[in-house]
Amino acid sequence: MGLNPLGSNKKPRVTLIFSRDSERTQFKGAAADIAEAHKCSPTEAVLELVLEYVAATRQARDIARTMYSSETPRSLDALELVYRELEAVGERGGDTAPLVQRLLDLSLHLGLSIDTTADEAVNLRNHWESVVEVLRDAAASGDIHRRTTARTASQLTATLVSPTAMLAICSHVSTLADSWDVLRGERSAYGVLSALAQMSVPTRRGIVETGEDRLETMRVIDNFYLSGREASD
């Protein structure tokens, strides 16, 4: 089905092109039956099947709907939605560490950076200062690793205050990931993550986010909701 995955504008095709009449007949018949069974239109039935491929959980599929409603869908938009939810309600039994790691992976791959002069930077700095305080308290036990991480976080505060049009976020996300056992229950940590996801733009020349990148992000988000479901069983 479909002889060429790219259209004349060199972008991936979204129009269904069947190479054989039998494929078209099979598609129409199956879509009609699914639509009848679920009491919806064939278009709604096919869309739901596509989203079920993207994610197994209802929560992740809702996020996918929002992300793909944009003409330029981004993993960062999907992650921001999750981080904001976590800031409001917490982990609730799910494993959030892979969600932090996903932002770190994207920051390294795409060269994610932020503009510290933007209005949103005020909110980011406030949350970061709260994170630093949590890490300082954790370092009071005398653990060398925790003291080092707290010192690094404190030093990174200056980078958020200094006016910079393109500040790479990898060091900030790495610091969060490095002490996630301490931060996973802190609303301020999710506030930092959501602000970074909202503000970040790719800056690595020649590297663009791909469909595979977005699907991998949705897989990580889906697994988070699955882990929460398993924990509640």
Image (cartoon, rainbow, N blue to C red):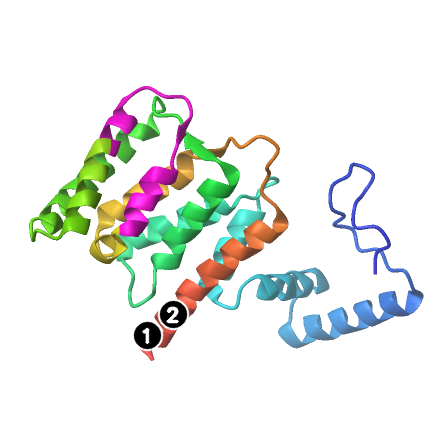
Q: Is residue 61 above or below residue 114?
A: below
Q: Which mark is residue 16?
A: none
Q: Residue furthest front?
A: 144
Q: Position of residue 228 (x, y in %)?
A: 35, 69
Q: How many marks?
A: 2
Determine the residue positioned at 39% across, 58% down: 98
Q: Position of residue 140 (x, y in %)?
A: 7, 49
Count neighbours of disc 1 (C-alpha within 10 A) and say few if under 14, some if 14 to 19, many if 20 or more: few
Count neighbours of disc 2 (C-alpha within 10 A) and say few if under 14, some if 14 to 19, many if 20 or more: some
Choose between 40 and 157: the one closer to the eye: 157
Q: Are marks 2 and 1 in contact (CB under 8 Å)?
A: yes
- Can you identify the residue that label 1 sits on? 231
Determine the residue positioned at 46% across, 48% down: 105
- Can you identify the residue that label 2 sits on? 227
Q: Position of residue 115 (x, y in %)?
A: 39, 25
**Residue 192 as seen in the image, left or right of residue 31:** left
Q: Which residues are magenta?
A: 156-178
Q: Residue furthest right?
A: 21
Choose between 35 and 53: the one closer to the eye: 53
**Residue 122 as seen in the image, left or right of residue 15:** left
Q: Position of residue 81 (x, y in %)?
A: 41, 49
Q: CA distance from mark 2 to mark 1?
A: 6 Å
Q: Is residue 129 above or below residue 232?
A: above
**Residue 176 as seen in the image, left or right of residue 6:** left
Residue 82 shows up from this direction: no
Residue 187 shows up from this direction: yes
Please, what is the three-letter code of the amino acid marked with disc 2? Ser
In the picture, the quarter occupied by the N terminus is: bottom right
What secondary structure do most residues of the magenta stretch adopt? helix
